[in-house]
Image (tube, rainbow, N blue to C red):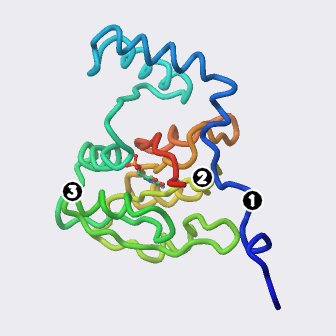
């Protein structure tokens, strides 16, 4: 079949970060100018206000801002006491950060398969790879959608495992009145946009 260039090239961009400028561009510029004008680039009142607002929005006790979603995962695992010799179950179908964070604290990533219909972790496959060294599960909420967190939490409860939700792709996803990232022991978020 012959195809010319126009036929082969998608005209729908995967992401248009400039669209939001039309709605909140003025507000963003004023907020940036506020920070620049204050000369306070690290911590400061805006950071504390942000953490309070995020905690309220998610319905959690604390929100702590760090530099990236990857470090949020590393710090979350560290705070949970995950250490060398431990195994942490996560998804093979996600950005590399979850497996990377597990390695960064010296633990071993164990991949459980995903569900064909959702691309999220398959709870049955998670249960199948639990060993006596398993300490935690990192389920990943993908595409702005809630993963099957109820089943994952049930498995974690029955096997005394910790759950660190990776919410980098699903800030604001909601199910049954609860926000993604508010159900496990901790949640890690990111503001990194997908590359264009
Ligand atoms: C699912 C997932 N987890 C974690 C991360 C890491 O976030 P960051 O790029 O802020 O380190 C990303 C980034 O794309 C991601 O998609």
Q: Residue at x 60, y 23 (%)?
A: 25
The percent coordinates of residue 128 (x first, y second) are 47, 77
Q: Nearer the viewer, mark 1 or mark 2?
A: 1
User: Quick one: label 1 or label 3, which is nearer the N terminus?
Assistant: 1
- Which disc, if any, is residue 150? 2
Q: Is residue 128 above or below residue 40?
A: below
Q: Nearer the viewer, residue 13 or 156?
A: 13
Q: Position of residue 21 (x, y in %)?
A: 63, 29
Q: Nearer the viewer, residue 21 or 158?
A: 21
Q: How far apart in space, not on screen, are marks 3 and 2 (Cα)?
A: 27 Å
The residue under label 3 is 105
Q: Is residue 141 left or right of residue 177?
A: left
Q: Is 187 positioned to the left or the right of 39 in the image?
A: right
Q: Residues within 10 Å of mark 3 (few under 14, many from 20)?
A: some
Which callout, 1 or 3, points to the residue nearer the camera? 1
Residue shown at 41% from the left, 61% from the top: 159
Label pair 1/2, CB-CB below 8 angstroms: no
Tag 3 near tag 2, CB within 8 Å: no
Marks 1/2: CA distance? 38 Å
Q: Position of residue 86 (x, y in %)?
A: 24, 64
């Amino acid at each position: 079949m012959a195809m010319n260039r126009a036929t082969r090239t998608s005209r729908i961009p995967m992401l248009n970060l400039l669209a939001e400028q039309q709605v909140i561009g003025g507000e963003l510029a004023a907020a940036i100018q506020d920070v620049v004008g204050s000369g306070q680039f690290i911590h400061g009142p805006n950071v504390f206000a942000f953490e309070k607002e995020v905690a309220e929005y998610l319905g959690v006790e604390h929100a702590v801002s760090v530099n990236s979603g990857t470090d949020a995962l590393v710090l979350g695992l560290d705070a949970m006491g995950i250490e060398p010799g431990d195994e942490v179950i996560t998804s093979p179908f996600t950005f590399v950060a979850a497996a990377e964070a597990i390695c960064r604290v010296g633990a071993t990533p164990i991949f459980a398969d995903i569900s064909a219909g959702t691309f999220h972790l398959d709870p049955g496959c998670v249960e199948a790879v639990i060993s006596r060294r398993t300490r935690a599960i990192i389920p990943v909420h993908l595409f702005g959608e809630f993963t099957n967190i109820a089943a994952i939490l049930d498995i974690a409860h029955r096997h005394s495992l910790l759950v660190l939700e990776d919410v980098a792709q699903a800030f604001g996803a909601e199910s049954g009145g609860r926000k993604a990232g508010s159900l496990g022991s901790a949640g890690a978020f990111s503001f990194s946009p997908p590359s264009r």
